[in-house]
Image (cartoon, coloured by chain):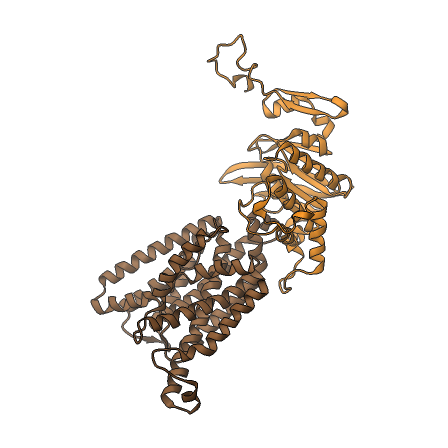
Amino acid sequence: MTELLSGRVSFDVGGRSILQAVDVGIREGECVAIVGTNGAGKTTLLRLLANVLAPSRGGLSLRGTPYNQLTARQLAGSLAYVPQVRPARVPLTVRDVVLLGRYPHKRRWSFGYEAADFEAAARALEVVGAADLAARDMSELSGGECQGVYIAAALAQEAECLILDEPTTYLDPGHQRQIAHLLERLIRRDGRTLVFASHDLNLAFALADRVIALAAGKVVAAGPTADMLVTPLLEQLYGAPFHVSCPAGIPVVSVDLSTRSVIGPDRAPDGAPGEETT
Amino acid sequence: MKRTFLVCVAAVWVGILVLGPFVGAHEVGLGELAAGDAVASRIIWQLRVPRLLLALLAGGALAVCGAAFQTLFGNPLAEPYTLGVAGGAALGAVLAQQLVSTAVVGGLPVVAVASFAGALAASSVIVFVARRRSTATLLLAGVAVALTSSALILFVQYLADFSRTFRMVRWMMGGLAVVGYREVLWVAPWIVFGAVALFLMRRELDQLATGEEIATSRGVDLGRLRMAVVAVVSLMVGALVAVTGPIGFVGLIVPHWVRRGVGHAHAWVLPGAFVAGGAFLALCDLLARRILAPADLPVGVLTAIIGGPFFLWLLLQNKYR
């Protein structure tokens, strides 16, 4: 398998290092999950991969060609990005939003959209199961439907690699499951390359072939999913007690949120909580 | 729906262009014009037709600039007047009226040259301050420039003598009183160039609807888009304010109204705004000339009087936040 995305990147903001020499190697057709605490640099790494940001040092390559030797449009033909934060109010219909994904394929002098664009948009909506929403206003959609539409827009872009930031955050369990199934289909059936960041470790472990764990802008561990699914590693990464079980052969990771371990019977109630986790 | 809206507005535009010259303080009929009446011919061809053309061009330009700014800044209140471009132009013009004694330089009114320079200076400041920053910073820089230039205008007016202050205040009201075609021919190339240039950026402007991050990831160069839109708008507004003085609210109301008719795709919004803006300003000007006839109410006063309440009404409509 050839490496679709590769390189080493660092990113600073105002003298503060966000990412330090993070090595990236994403092979064609694989699914990579990026995990880590808030502020670990997950979103920054995704933005660098999606060419939304330029690295402070180092650089990335698409199939061996450095990003800076490709035009932004050429990159967009191979990389589609679905960020977590999006405008609250989009005055467009679902179809319009999905058609916007066709931008990298449009010429400056062409007017409007062609049949190929409408077909790509319709196919994308079909894949995410939102074909019946096409004529609806974005403002009428639920959070889960909205996420599906943005993924459809990324699909309409016809890029082989999808980059998603927190694809299931803020969604209810039912919609989380729907999005997880959608992503699974895209990987297993359509053979897409997928890179996503998530706090949902179960999603990460269920979908990803490989997991990259970031902490404070550095890669602390990276490897095949099975190797990363170990309690000590997770506890070190997040500073919280974890429990991994394997009912029916599917690993389930859960963080121990109970307060008993902090305010135990042997502790005074006014003892400093949280000390245990540091 | 989109097509019907655009066709209707275009029909009104053509109607105004054809019938407009026959409306005014002095009754001039087609018969008199056909009979070769010298006075009628002068009124129509030297006063009313150029004034009407200027209104159609100016209104169109203001609306197109407003539409582009609203999208670029993601803010429904953005237009050249709220963002200091027109303020800079007005400051330039007022300074010229106060400081320069000659009326004409290089065949052009001093005021025109100065306001053009003022618009460019204002937008240069905005672009310089916000060069590598977010769109929100650009918006705030624009507001800062607008407030500073209006304060400086007041300062200059305070220093000026009575008759000059009067002229400045008059000019600040914004009007379309022209004699002959010189001004029209002077602004037309800037406006046509600007409108075409903005139309060529329509897809990039469309992309901003789902946010700057997605737009960038799809290959829109936001830095260049910002610079290009601000530069084009200041060229258009600078040239325009030079001739008409600041005319507010057209750039604010018309794009909002047009979007209700044609949706949000800029391939429709920009041409729609150009035609609707021209028709709107021309109608306002016809009305302004009738209200106090034979006196000539500056159209900027009327657009502001109509514009404020109309805009409030638009905001109360359910589709707007």
Q: Find the residue positioned furthest to the top.
A: A266
Q: Residue A51 in the image: x percent, y percent?
A: 61, 47
**Residue at figure coordinates x 69%, y 21% from the top left:** A244
Query: Which chain comes out brown in the rendered image?
Result: B
Q: Find the residue positioned furthest to the bottom.
A: B35
Instruction: Count all numbered tags in the image, as a single digit.
Output: 0
**Residue at figure coordinates x 55%, y 57% from the top left:** B264
Nearer to the camera, B130 or A205: A205
Nearer to the camera, B178 or A219: B178
Q: Residue A268 in the image: x percent, y percent?
A: 48, 10
Decide: is A205 above or below B140: above
Query: Which chain comes out orange in the rendered image?
Result: A
Decide: is A209 above or below B68: above
**Residue at figure coordinates x 50%, y 74% from the top left:** B14
Q: Residue A63 in the image: x percent, y percent?
A: 72, 47
Decide: is B145 above or below B94: above
**Residue at figure coordinates x 57%, y 57% from the top left:** B204
Q: Residue B57 in the image: x percent, y percent?
A: 46, 71
